[in-house]
Image (tube, rainbow, N blue to C red):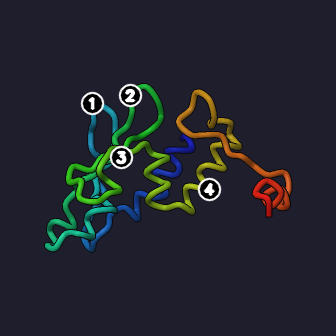
């Protein structure tokens, strides 16, 4: 199981959104993805049935072990465009994204040739203040 798949399994239980909303496996060209209520625009819906509607999906890529978030409703600034899994995680759960980024960095799957930039780790806590001129 890749790091992306591990973090996907961590967020799937909380993506159900509204009371009674569900995350359901979906088939995308022979690969398994997930359909769920959009975490960004479902809260803006007036009717409960619209809040539960599975209008968003995490679709797998056929050439790699990554996913793309896509919302069909597009009623929030956060879901107007499709997002890669790291960018979706960054907007949806920033704390979990930082942990994901660190795990990917430690595993060597960031930087050139990957879909996530390399972390700039500081050697000591005082480096931040020196670089920022504080």
- Tell me the mark number nearer the camera, choosing from 2 and 3: 3
Q: Nearer the viewer, residue 120 or 58?
A: 120
Q: Quadrant of residue 31?
A: top left
Horizontal side, residue 108 vs residue 25: left or right = right
Q: How many marks?
A: 4
**Sequence-wise, which precedes: disc 3 or disc 1?**
1
CA separation in Å, label 3 and label 4: 19 Å
Q: Are marks 2 and 4 in contact (CB under 8 Å)?
A: no
Horizontal side, residue 119 vs residue 8: left or right = right
Q: Are marks 2 and 3 in contact (CB under 8 Å)?
A: no
**What percent of the width, then of the height, locates residue 115?**
53, 36
Pointer 4 residue = 99
CA separation in Å, label 2 and label 4: 26 Å
Q: Are marks 1 and 2 in contact (CB under 8 Å)?
A: yes
* Secondary structure at numbered mark 2: loop
Count neighbours of disc 4 (C-alpha within 10 A) and say few if under 14, some if 14 to 19, many if 20 or more: few
CA separation in Å, label 1 and label 2: 8 Å
The residue at the point 83 percent across, 57 percent down is: 130
**Sequence-wise, which precedes: disc 1 or disc 2?**
1
Pointer 1 residue = 29
CA separation in Å, label 2 and label 3: 15 Å
* Secondary structure at numbered mark 1: loop
Pointer 3 residue = 69
Horizontal side, residue 123 vs residue 85: left or right = right
**What percent of the width, then of the height, locates residue 22?**
28, 62
Q: Nearer the viewer, residue 108 or 10?
A: 108
Pointer 2 residue = 62
**What percent of the width, then of the height, locates residue 118?**
66, 40
Count neighbours of disc 2 (C-alpha within 10 A) and say few if under 14, some if 14 to 19, many if 20 or more: few
**Sequence-wise, which precedes: disc 2 or disc 3?**
2
Instruction: Determine whether 75 is above or below 84 in the image.
Output: below
Q: Are marks 3 and 4 in contact (CB under 8 Å)?
A: no
């Amino acid at each position: 199981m890749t790091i992306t798949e591990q973090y996907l399994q961590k967020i799937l239980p909380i993506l159900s959104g509204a009371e009674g909303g569900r995350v359901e496996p979906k088939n995308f060209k022979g690969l398994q993805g997930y359909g769920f209520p959009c975490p960004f625009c479902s809260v803006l819906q007036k009717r409960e049935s619209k809040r539960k509607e599975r209008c968003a999906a995490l679709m797998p890529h056929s050439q790699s072990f990554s996913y793309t978030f896509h919302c069909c409703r597009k009623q929030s600034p956060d879901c107007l465009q499709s997002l890669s899994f790291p960018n979706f995680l960054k907007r949806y759960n920033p704390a979990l994204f930082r942990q994901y980024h660190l795990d990917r960095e430690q595993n060597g799957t960031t930087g050139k040739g990957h879909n996530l930039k390399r972390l700039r780790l500081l050697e000591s806590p005082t480096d931040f203040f020196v670089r920022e001129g504080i």
